[in-house]
Amino acid sequence: MNSLANGSFSCRAISELNGSFGSTQRYSIKLSSFVGGGRRVCSKKAGGSRRGKIVACSAEGTVTTIATGVPDSSILSKREFPPAFWKEEMISSLISTYDELSAPEKEQRMQTLIAEIKDMFKSMGDGETNPSAYDTAWVARIPSVDGSDRPQFPQTLQWILKNQLSDGSWGEELCFLTYDRALATLACVITLTLWNTGEEQVKKGVEFITNHAERMEGEADNHRPSGFEIVFISMLNEAQTLGLDLPYDLPFFKQINEMRETKLKKIPLNVVHAIPTTILYSLEGLQEIVDWDKMMKLQSKDGSFLSSPASTAAVFMRTGDQKSLDFLTFVLNKFHDHVPCHYPLDLFERLWAVDTVERLGIDRHFKNEIKETLDYVYMYWDERGIGWARDNAVGDIDDTAMGLRILRLHGYNVSSDALKTFRDGNGEFFCFMGQTQRGVTDMLNVHRCSQVALPGEEIMEEAKLCTQRYLTNALESVGAFDKWALKKDLQGEVEYVLKYPWHRSMPRLEARSYIEQYGANDVWLGKSMYLMPCVSNAKYLELARLDFNSVQSIQQKEIQELQRWWIVSGLAKLGFTPDRLVETYFAVAASMFEPEFAMCRAVYTKASIFIVILNYFYEAYATSGHDVTLFSEAITRWDLSLVDKMPQEMKTCFLSFYDTMNEIAQEGSRRQGRDVLPYIRNLMEVQVASHDSEAKWVQDKYTPSLDEYINNAKISMGLGTIVLTSVLFTGELLSSNVLSKIGHGSKFLHLISLTGRLIYDSKTYEENKIRGKVSAIQCCIKDHPEISEEQALNHIYTLMQNALLELNWELVTNNDVPESCRKLVFNTARAMQLFFMEKDGFTLSHLEMQEHIKKCLFQPVL
């Protein structure tokens, strides 16, 4: 111990550099104090660049590090993270090199499909659909207006004679439903009998009905055609009068008759005669009880009765109304020898076609066509709701909800009040006003619509809760069995929408899911089964598959390039932050997936990685009680001269940060036509200032008020820095005024940062509490000591949900900001909701997130 009395002496110092011992340096040291039993603390005076290194000096003159003014690697490396799942070997194993078509062949095929689909959009008139044997039979009944003993439309009678199916029935050959076939066949045999022709066809038709009548009872009521009980019983009575040999005494036929009587009691004749109802669709089944003079007041502008050729034909035969005949002539001029089950279908066809290309992820190829299509729909939009055709006197919730959602998201001014038409006094929603019918497809569309609600729209919240209950029950009880549609995977569609509502879904995930669910031969059910070739078409599906795989191939190359950058930059060696490069890339690639946004994706990924590093970097320093002033000062001054004073991991962080951001600024300046480095530096200064504040809270063990916390934590979350850097690469020239609309201080950025912070805090609260990190939940409890953690979490959740509604408003109304920029900002908020839907899906990279990433980025669509 006596030797320690010397004022200064030389000694050998063993320093820890990059986690390894053994480098020897000579120090001139000054005795300062004692530590423990015979060890004194010496400060480095000269001979090296490690400022503030604290060493312990033994009596033998050996110096070893015991504490530091800035932490070494061991301090920053102490937190453990789940290992990276997406390592280079894993990615390489998933990337497929096999392809049936070469790249030029795929591109040529895609361009061919795009051209053909564009032609489909351009050719949309009043709606393309398949023949309805049922409606054609009713039109074929009409006698010639010149008084001759022949049909007014003889070509329809010939169509019936030529189109009987091999089993003796009439109807849609693609799909068999006993209800549909029996109804169409009964109509056809009656018509042939009335015209005293087709004796052999009539015989086969009667045999079919007789052999299959009882099968209807075993078929689900949900697949009973619209108005079946009204028209079937009426025709059955007529067939009996004509002497057709059918099993009229079947108990099931009596049940159908009872259903008819029950339905008619629900809609009294005075109501039928006064206002448009769905009864207009089935007037051929009510010929003996309606007042035709009164019914004529409910005729549509186009001369039809709810677009139904059968109903309109019955009206004409009863009244001789010229407008009704003109409508039927118009339809036959279009289809020549047959009619569909309803026509026009112009609004339905257009809305569903737009929805199809959007859900399949191929809408970017048809922007002009979509604009023209929606302009047409908006021209006929009615705040009381719309139907499947422009002149429909009766709206339906299916078309109304689809129109409301799509038009709103495309910037058209539409009100959710249109949904009120279809709500009863108990807050339940139905397909038609005054009716009690609803199906899975229409409730699914209402549910999707409710998710684009704006602040204060109570009707949308009611619709969301009602349809969520209905769809959940439908899955549990009937597996999403639907009344109006026979779809390939309706159950899968419902499951996806309930699990991943709009704010939690990402465009590329939805496209991948819908490609697997989409049916190119889906069938709808009105009075008869019908197809919509501009809605369900194999060309859409083929293009979607080719396009998805083509984009995925591009993104795989981008990931490999980013991995090389990650390694070369030295960031891969940092031990205090998780390797989540692929997860970070997925966050932007799942929405900004178009090839032209390649640079945007790269910048977004790199900026996000630095934000993650900064978060863990400042947290590690704060919790270890060490100073980060040097790093913050270097960022603020953008000064390389401070690097030599940094420990190795801090140096690695800063140099990579400095080099990458300068490269981004250089490319951003080239694209924007002005120097954007000051703009990017300002973003970084604001970012590190927020981390400094949080570090001080941790060190001081200070819990701020919720308002104080949010004002800082929404910045430290880093979403603002990420999107405000990346937005420079969306292909738009952005003025300072435009940037201010989404910049710090804007409501748009406030909302994505707020929702991101609140979802993160609510799902990581327990873990962060253990680590000593302040969260919104703690701050809420501080403001209101009387509440429990559960109540605080509920309050945070409510704040977030309200903010998401306001975010919808910013998306659809902030038209001063280019669409691509708005989508980048908005979809960043959605990515946060997805990653943290249950827990920290980013840091933990749990199995569900791995599956999302695999399907989006690595697994081709077959």
Image: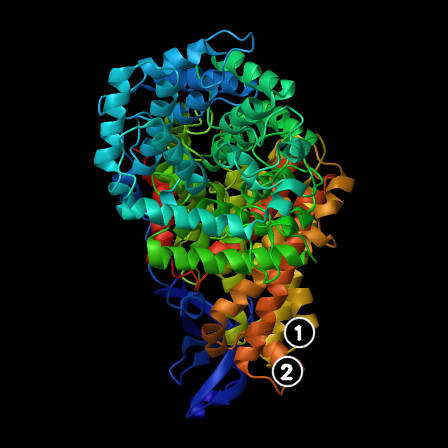
- Of 155 and 477, nearer the camera is 155
Q: Residues within 10 Å of mark 1 (few under 14, many from 20)?
A: some
In the image, residue 746 sits, relative to residue 52, either above or below, namely above
- Of 382 and 506, nearer the camera is 382
The count of marks equals 2
Gap in angstroms between the C-alphas marked 2 and 1? 8 Å
Q: Is residue 143 visible?
A: yes
Instruction: Identify the residue at image location x=55%, y=18%.
Output: 328
Mark 2 vs 1, N-terminal side? 1
Q: Quadrant of the N terminus?
A: bottom left
In the image, is 772 to the left or to the right of 672?
left
In the image, is 416 to the left or to the right of 192?
right
In the image, residue 229 sits, relative to residue 839, either above or below, namely above
In the image, is 753 to the left or to the right of 364?
right
Residue position for label 1: 706
Name the spot of residue 452 as percent of width and height, x first.
Answer: 60, 49
Q: Secondary structure at mark 2?
A: helix
Name the spot of residue 30 as percent of width and height, x first.
Answer: 55, 79
Q: Is residue 451 visible?
A: no
Instruction: Identify the residue at image location x=57%, y=49%.
Output: 267
Amino acid residing under circle 2:
Lys
Residue position for label 2: 782
In the image, residue 780 sits, relative to residue 399, either above or below, namely below
Q: Quadrant of the C terminus?
A: top left
Amino acid residing under circle 1:
Leu
Name the spot of residue 369 as percent of width and height, x first.
Answer: 58, 23
The answer to whether the residue labelled 2 contacts the one labelled 1, judged by CB atoms less than 8 Å apart, is: yes
- Of 535 and 706, nearer the camera is 535
Q: Secondary structure at mark 1?
A: helix
